[in-house]
């Protein structure tokens, strides 16, 4: 089992920045590919970003490319999502996800790719 706990959400003005963290425990974090998803009110959960367990491969949704950066620190069992130039449409609950991977380059961009989920952290961007 892997337990995931997100933190770092909050209220920020448009154009501002936030850094989300996802702390993992329970298994060897360094063998888990990680992802971030978000769900806005009235909408389905959507992919934001993902990173392989090595950190060498990553991907982003088109809507956040150039503004968000995913990273991880395997020594601290933590992944991060740096969010810059935030827009009101980024308002959502952000979820951390994890899946064991034998491949050092694999990451998933769909909900069904992941086995473990955090409880989510609210991000609100005011205009």
Image (tube, helix red, strand yellow):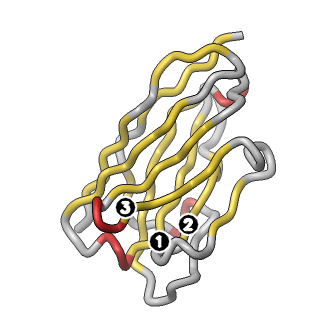
Which quadrant is home to the C terminus? top right
**Circle on res. 116:** 3
**Percent of width and height locating residue 92:** 58, 30
Q: Which residue is mark 1?
A: 33
**Image position of 119 (left or right of 49):** left
Distance (Cα) linking label 1 and label 3: 11 Å
Which residue is pictured at 68% across the width and 63% down the height?
59
**Circle on res. 109:** none
**Image position of 50 (left or right of 100):** right
First of labels 2, 1 by sequence position: 1
Distance (Cα) linking label 2 and label 1: 6 Å
Give the secondary structure at mark 2.
Answer: strand
Pointers 2 and 1 in contact (C-beta within 8 Å): yes
* Crowd class of label 3 (few under 14; some 14 to 19; many from 20; radius 10 Å): some
First of labels 2, 3 by sequence position: 2
Please tell me in which quadrant of the rendered image residue 119 appears.
top left
Please tell me in which quadrant of the rendered image residue 89 appears.
top right
């Amino acid at each position: 089992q892997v337990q995931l706990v997100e933190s770092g959400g909050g209220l920020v003005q448009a154009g501002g920045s936030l850094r989300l963290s996802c702390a993992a425990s329970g298994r060897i974090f360094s063998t888990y590919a990680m992802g971030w998803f978000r769900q806005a009110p009235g909408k389905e959960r959507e992919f934001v970003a993902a990173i392989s367990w090595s950190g060498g491969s990553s991907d982003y949704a088109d809507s956040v490319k150039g503004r968000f950066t995913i990273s991880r620190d395997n020594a601290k069992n933590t992944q991060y999502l740096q969010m810059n130039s935030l827009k009101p449409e980024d308002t959502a609950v952000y979820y951390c996800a994890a899946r064991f991977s034998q491949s050092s380059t694999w990451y998933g961009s769909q909900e069904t790719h992941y086995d473990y989920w955090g409880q989510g952290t609210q991000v609100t961007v005011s205009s």
